[in-house]
Image (cartoon, helix red, strand yellow):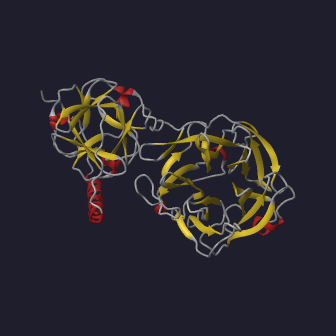
Amino acid sequence: MIRPAIPALRRPGLHLVSAALAALSALLLLCSSLVSAAPAAAATIDVNAWYVLVNRHSGKVADVYERATGDGAAIVQWARNDGAWQQWQFVDSGGGYYRLRSRHSGKVLDVYNHSTADGANIVQWSDLNGANQQFRVADTDNGHVKLINRNSGKALEAWEWSTADGARLSQYTDLNGANQQWRLVKLGDTTTPPPTYPNPGLVTGDINVHDPEVTKTPSGGYLLAHTGNGVSLKTSSDRTAWRNAGAAFPGGVPWAHPYTDGGNHVWAPDITHVNGRYYMYYSASTFGSNRSAIFLATSTSGASGSWTNEGLVIESRTSDNFNAIDPNLVIDDEGRWWLAFGSFWSGIKMVQLNPSSGKRLDSTIRSIAGRNGGAIEAPTIYKRGSYYYQLVSFDTCCQGAASTYRIMVGRSTSVTGPYVDRNGVALTSGGGTQLLAGHGDIHGPGHQAVLADTDGDILFYHWYAGDNSSRLGINKIGYDTAGWPYVY
């Protein structure tokens, strides 16, 4: 039976751009192949499992529109929620081809009306094992695949590069575009990220913080430093209940006054316990200015009033193209000390430190992330396995519930970079894979820190409640099968 046509809008111009980008990508891949011709590992399909299909371009998933159960219902992309209408099982058709069966309806992905045309709609239909219902899984990179239809030879894609909920899925000539690439997320796998961002874990006591940073104490407790007069301190024995512990400098910070317009309110401390001492780097500035400085303080106990001012580490002036705030100390596998820092301007920078003094080792300033003058700040770098992960905060801080802060991540095999996101985009070119963003009543999570604890890597950050108060957020960090972090 010939099925009635489903109208499809077409804007070929976008696909001409897509084709040009794909051609450039193909040229780069060809050049890369001259260096290494090793093939990508073939995707392994578990025919007993259910999968969510995540589009590389939009981050949204293949979804049966409006949870329909009838033949001909549209297949679209939608924000992931792991509903049965977003779950698919690969049914073996032989010859390396599969039908994709909806858990919700029992029907399979189908190229409507056996079309071989670019832009043909993808629908669900009763399983007839037709060639238009069979797809080959073709490897790309970064753990993504393409789904190539057996009848048409064309690739399943998010039409017109859309990122909107409800945008239709179609088939199109295989251009290897990000909108034609899919990550197969196997449900029930312990390395599978949750479908939505988690709320902060339970914390109690004195939890109003801004720009938190945490280190373990020799006794196994926690010492937290955050923005405040003379650097505010908090302690906890269990990472849940927190209490105020005074200020590092209860008498003020007169050495920072040239950068703070005479005030004692200093920002964004970074605290590390190493070699039997606490090292704390912190920022002195005024809002919106890059007349800023990063200072070092040390203490053997970490207690209020016990800190010694070790002096200036690095400063920036209004004539500079960087901002010397938001420090983060990272010690690499070779025992070398590095300080990452930066906010807006030309982005995130890094300098090497002398471990014996905690001050700069040389005059070199490296660039490790940036958004061409856009909103990026608060770097955090930590090592896990083969990678150094750099977390940064994008967008607007310090606006209470109106804040749009969000946490992004890239990684590198070298502490100095280059750092790239999941799609291979350099963080120095505005790249970054989103790790955590506002959701529900959780506004503007950011200015993050990571602590390797006995139960895994722990993410600390601040977030804003509806009353505009800034609060402590704590979540665990998990890692998917490709080694990319997620929070839970």
What x and y, as percent, mark residue 1? 12, 27
In screen coordinates, is 190 left or right of 328? left
Depth check, front residue: 309 or 317 = 309
Residue 255 is at least partly visible in this image: yes
Residue 147 drawn above or below residue 140 = above
**Which residue is at a point 16% across and 38% down the rendered structure image?**
95
Instruction: Give how far across and how far down residue 221 sits, in percent.
Output: 72, 43
Which residue lies most toward the left here? 1
Image spot of residue 347 (x, y percent): 56, 64
The residue depicted at 40 percent of the width and 43 percent of the height is 164
Residues 327 and 337: in front is 337
Answer left or right for 78 relative to 224: left
Residue 14, located in which quarter of the rendered image? bottom left
- Judging depth in this view, the residue of 309 and 462 nearest the camera is 309
Identity of the residue drawn at 47% across and 38% down: 193
| Left or right side of 138 for 379 | right
Q: Position of residue 358 (x, y in %)?
A: 69, 66
